[in-house]
Every structure is written in structure tokens, then in C-alpha cells.
Amino acid sequence: MTSASTPVRPAVHQVLATLGYGDAIGNEVLGIQAALRAAGYESEIFVETAEPRLEPLTHDYRDLVEASHPDNILIHHFSIGSRASRIAYALPDRMVLVYHNITPPEYFVGVHKDLVRQCFSGRRELRAYVNRCELALGDSEFNRQELEQFGFTRTGVLPVVPSFTHLDEPPDHTLVGEFDDERPNFLFVGRIIPNKRIDDVIRFFHAYRVKHQPRARLLLVGSYGGFDSYLTSLHHLIATLGVPDVHILGHVSNAALSACYDVADLFLSASEHEGFCVPLVEAFYKRVPVMAYAATAVPATLDGAGVLYDRKDPRHVASIMDTVLTDSALESEIVRGQDAALQRMLGLDFSRVLLTAIDEVQRSPRCQPVAVRWDFWQRFAVWERLEELRLYRPSAYKALPFAPGERGENP
């Protein structure tokens, strides 16, 4: 039994907008919870939405209000502005902010107007947490530096330790049979979105086919949902260049993803904005040599391994691609370097870094209370009722009067 003089250990909960299955943030959230529980902390996950397979592991973010306590520590995963973020801001719990980066909105101008707004709002909203959290952690050194640029003074790095279990599944033999031959295969894995600069990957591939090997293939793996106009522009570029054998595979199963890495001769990235970029280390794990544009977090993620290039002249990049694929000794040296970098990453003591950060917060003076509107919770309750109407009684929600000028059409 705990005596009256024994302090009660605070709970350490996590809050985020969405918990995804198999993505970098989702894996980190689950890893944090496992480490906290192993250390004896009560720890739950509060979300707005979760992938169906993970829903049983989560609680609705609104339930965080009841779980809140001034002595608790709230790990707030900030990747874009959300309702969960605003609830976290208003609660009295001590806060550790984990920043997963927000892509600059200019990459989505003319492509996805809602994401332009969300990214702009998210970057603006992040500044409000400068005086709200006791500690701000980036999941890479690049993200930590961005936190400093936003004005955070107490920062650190909570390392990403990727899970590779999804790549241990038996590969899709149909895909292997289609692409595993003597022809060189180039691979990119990641969402088909503008900051990844898939258009540059296609230009580099075209230059390589023209100058070096006309029978090469390019495999592009990743979801393009919501980016139909960017996908259309890529198809237009392929047609304009007249370059065949570009296979846009979209979102694939784990078995198909494993097969894509297995048949790949080179992983090629031209991305201009990354907070970490997990597919780079997935390629390390599958022992595929990596070439990547030296921008944002990419050089730190590669950790001295792989091949970095800093000029986007297609002929220059194509020449490097050819050198890697035709010099077997060089290719072996690149893979050995990637093996060593992967071992350094896997050797990081994630639990120790996390628990040290929690101890640091517990020992440090509390932040000054932040100002929250006097009617915040009243407004929140009203919004909850409106949201319930919108979701479950849409006809009643649409019957509500609009504010003047809110609708584009005349009544």
C-alpha cells in the first residue's frame, strides 16, 4: 500500500490527431507507450481518429479531459494543427511536445488547397506552444533545429527507431516474377506528393535511359490519394518525355513492398523536404544502395552512408546512377556503409532517451500557466454538439442558419 508521504507517480499519456498503422509516427507512439509502461508509468493514447486495426489501443481525445491532472505529463505529437492539439493546449497537464515536421505549404499551392491551409495553420499554431511545453523534441536533428527557429528554447532529439517487421513478410512472387530479370530497376517509395519531387526522379530516369541503359525500369510506390492533379502532371511529363517503363504502383501491400525492395537495384530519391524519411532506412534494411538529394533531414538520416548529390542536372545525376550500378566494388562499399549506419541507428537506446526526458520534465520548474479564453470549454461543448449533429444528423446540421456571407450562394 502506498503511504501518505509517498508521492504518486504521474501518468504519462500521449495525444495526437491520427494513429496510423505501420507509419513512422504510429510506430513511435506505440514504442513510447511500451517503454513507459515497462518503466511503470500509466500511459494511454488519445486520438481523433485511428486506423481500424489500432482503434482498440486508443481512446477518444475528448476523454483526455477526464484523464487530465496537473501532475500528469502529456506527450503531444504535433504534425499538423488539430482539435486534439487545442484540447491539449487548454489542459493543465505538463507537456512534452514531439515535432514530426510540417511540410512548407508552398509545395501544395495549386495542387491541394486544403493542405495549403492546414500546413500554414499548423506552422502558425506551433508557435503557440513555445510557452506551453516544458520540453520540445524533434524526431530528427533537422526537426529539432526547426523547433529552435520557431522559438523553443528547451529542445532535444527523440530518435526514430523504425520497425522493419512489415518487410519481413514473404515477397509477392507475382511482382518478383514480373520485374526480377536482367533489366535494372530503380525504386522510389513515398507518398506521391509535390515535395517528394517525383517529377525530378522521372527526369533523372529518362536521362539515364537515354544516355546509359534504354531497358531500365522505374518503380514508384506510394499513395497518391488527394493528389490527383499532381499525379496527372506526372503522367503528362512521362508522355512529354516519351519515357516508357515508369510503373506508378500506388499504395501496395507489405508483401508487394518487400518485393519491390528485393527487385530494386538502386533506391533513388529527389525529395526536397523531409523530416526524417523512413524509406531511406528501409532500403538500408533491404540492402539496396541509396542515392538521395542532399536536402533538409536526408543527410542526417543517411548518417554518412548512401550517395548524396546536390545538383539536380539530370545528366549529372544519371551519370552517378550509372557509376553505382556498373562498379560492383563501389556498390558493395555503399551497402557496407549503409549496414553500419543501420546498426548505429538500431543501437540507439530509445527507452533511455525517452525516460531521461520524462525525468527532466518532472525535475524542472513548471511553465507559467498559459492564457486560455474564459469561455473555451463552453465553446468546446457547443462545438461538440454541432459536430455530433454534422456526423449523425446531417440534415439537421444543414438546416442550421448560416452566418452572413458564410455561404457563397444567395438564400
Image (tube, helix red, strand yellow):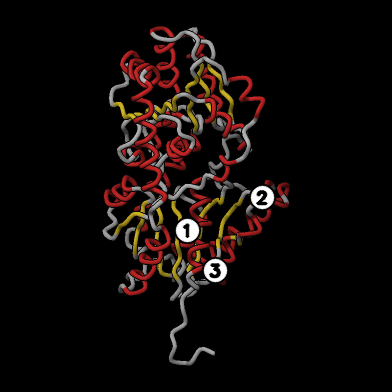
- The amino acid on which the numbered mark 3 sits, given as a three-letter code, is Val
Q: Which amino acid does the dot numbered 2 rest on?
A: Pro
> Which quadrant of the view contains residue 268?
top left
**What kind of element bears circle 3?**
helix
Task: Give the alpha-carbon distance from disc 3 to disc 1, as whole Å.
Answer: 12 Å
Secondary element under disc 1, as helix, strand or loop, is: helix
Viewer-side label of 2, 1: 2
Identify the residue under disc 2. Answer: 52
Quickly name the residue at label 1: 86
**What quarter of the picture does the N terminus occupy?**
bottom right
- Decide which of tag 3 and tag 1 comes sooner along the chain: 3
**From this viewpoint, is residue 310 visible?**
yes
- Residue visible at 42% across and 50% down in the picture: 346
Q: Height in image: 354 above or below 294?
A: below
Q: Position of residue 405 (x, y in %)?
A: 53, 41
Specify which label sits upstream in the sequence, 2 or 3.
Answer: 2
Residue at (39%, 58%) from the top-left corner? 349
Q: Residue under circle 3?
A: 65
The quadrant of the picture occupied by the C terminus is: top right
Tell me how far mark 2 sits from mark 1, CA to CA: 24 Å
When the figure is inspected, residue 58 is found, relative to residue 21, above or below; the finding is below
Mark 2 and mark 1 residues within 8 Å of each other at the beta carbon: no
Tell which circle, 2 or 1, labels the residue nearer the N-terminal end.
Answer: 2
Nearest to the observer: residue 104 or residue 44: 44
